[in-house]
Image (tube, rainbow, N blue to C red):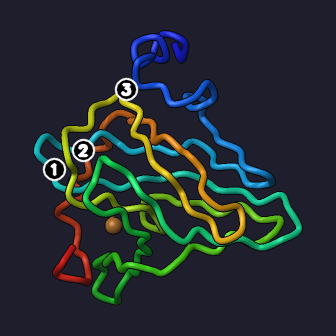
Amino acid sequence: MRHFISALLGTLALCGAAHAHSVKKDTLEIIHPHINEPFAGAKSAAAYMAISNEGAQDDRLIGIETPAAKKASLHSTEHASDGVARMTPIEAIDIPAGETINLEPGGMHIMLMGLTGPIKEGDMVPTTFHFEHAGPVAVEFMVDPADGVDHSKMDHASPSN
Ligand SMILES: [Cu+2]
């Protein structure tokens, strides 16, 4: 199946390893970076993955760029006492040595805001991750089936989101 998708998207391929489910740079591994297909017309989408650091040095994810959105932000989710989950922008995501950090629904995630075009299941969305120590890493988000959550309607702490 992966080969079939790769063949379809061959013209978009940036490099040979880009369609694998994980991306390695030095001792960092970004595992299954993905977006669930957003609703048609959605202005934003959330991306999830796990990032493991098998090295001896702590690292931090400090930013993401993608042509698929006007802005990509790092978000945490805080669960208030009223039961409402609110997402707030964070400066960086720490990836301590020897640990695996999960970016998942209800927790930290990457928010693509101001989508520049439709994102459909099966697409590969190109991005560049910036790590404090490992530097820039080319990563593609795989677009998985819709999860039924209209992320754009979730409560964001900042009105500019
Ligand atoms: Cu968010």
Image quadrant assignment for residue 136: bottom right
Q: Nearer the viewer, residue 36 or 14?
A: 14
Seen in the image, is 64 located left or right of residue 111? right
Residue 38 got which mark?
2
Amino acid carrying label 3: it is: Gly
Q: Nearer the viewer, residue 81 or 12?
A: 12
Seen in the image, is 138 located left or right of residue 88? right
Of helix, strand and loop, which one carries label 3? loop
Q: Is residue 121 above or below residue 148?
A: above
- Sequence-wise, which precedes: disc 2 or disc 3? 2
Q: Quadrant of the C terminus?
A: bottom left
Seen in the image, is 5 located left or right of residue 27? left
Cα separation between marks 3 and 1: 17 Å
Seen in the image, is 46 located left or right of residue 50? left
Asked if the residues shown at circle 2 and circle 1 are in contact, with their CB atoms under 8 angstroms apart, the answer is yes
Residue at 20% from the left image edge and 60% from the top image edge = 152
Cα separation between marks 2 and 3: 12 Å
Q: Position of residue 104 (x, y in %)?
A: 49, 58
Residue 42 got which mark?
1
Amino acid carrying label 2: it is: Pro
Q: Position of residue 67 (x, y in %)?
A: 32, 48
Q: Which residue is mark 3?
A: 122
* Ligand number 1: quarter of image: bottom left
Cα separation between marks 2 and 1: 6 Å
Q: Is residue 145 above or below residue 78?
A: above
Q: Is residue 32 above or below residue 59?
A: above
